[in-house]
Amino acid sequence: MNKKAPIYRTCIATRKLSLKSDLYRVVKYKGEICFDCNQNLPGRGAYISKDLSAITTAHDKHLLSKALRCEVNDDIYAQLVSALSKEKR
């Protein structure tokens, strides 16, 4: 019986520990910022809860920019919101 332990990560907006599958990942890789929908890209990553209030808090306080140590465009936040709306259907 070789069961894997669940993987937990901390949301940058809510600071709550959640399962990795319950979070979105944004990655800085080779100087570019991208939304990692499959959560398998290499590079520095930041996790955000799959919640609209968490995404808006991260946007208002520039939390992705702080976590990834570079400027993050509003396009990334728009991608997060669209992924959330697609998932809620």
Image (spheres, helix red, strand yellow):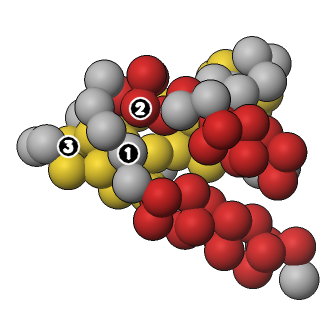
Q: Secondary structure at mark 3?
A: strand
Q: CA distance from mark 3 to mark 1?
A: 13 Å
Q: Tell me the amino acid under the disc marked 3.
A: Tyr
Q: CA distance from mark 1 to mark 2?
A: 5 Å
Residue at 52% from the left image edge and 44% from the top image edge: 25
Q: Nearer the viewer, residue 35 or 18?
A: 35
Q: Secondary structure at mark 1?
A: loop
- Is 71 drawn above or below residue 2 in the view shown? below
- Is 81 situated left or right of 65 in this image? right
Residue at 45% from the left image edge and 65% from the top image edge: 75
Q: Secondary structure at mark 2?
A: helix
Mark on residue 29?
3
Q: Return the disc, 2 or 3, that comes first in the chain's sequence.
A: 3
Q: Tell me the amino acid under the disc marked 2.
A: Ser
Mark on residue 72?
1
Mark on residue 65?
2
- Is 77 drawn above or below residue 49 in the view shown? below
Category of crowding for the residue at label 3, using alpha-carbon neighbours closer than 10 angstroms: few (below 14), some (14–19), many (at least 20) = some
Quadrant position of residue 78 = bottom right
Foreground mark, 3 or 1, reads 1
Q: Nearer the viewer, residue 88 or 12?
A: 12
Q: Position of residue 84 (x, y in %)?
A: 75, 66
- Residue 13 shows in the view: yes
**Cβ–Cβ under 8 Å for marks 1 and 2:** yes
Residue at 62% from the left image edge and 29% from the top image edge: 61
- Is 56 drawn above or below residue 74 in the view shown? above
Q: Position of residue 47 (x, y in %)?
A: 58, 34
Q: Nearer the viewer, residue 44 or 55?
A: 55
- Total label count? 3
Image quadrant holding the C terminus, namely: bottom right
Q: Position of residue 16 (x, y in %)?
A: 80, 18
- Is 51 situated left or right of 31 in this image? right
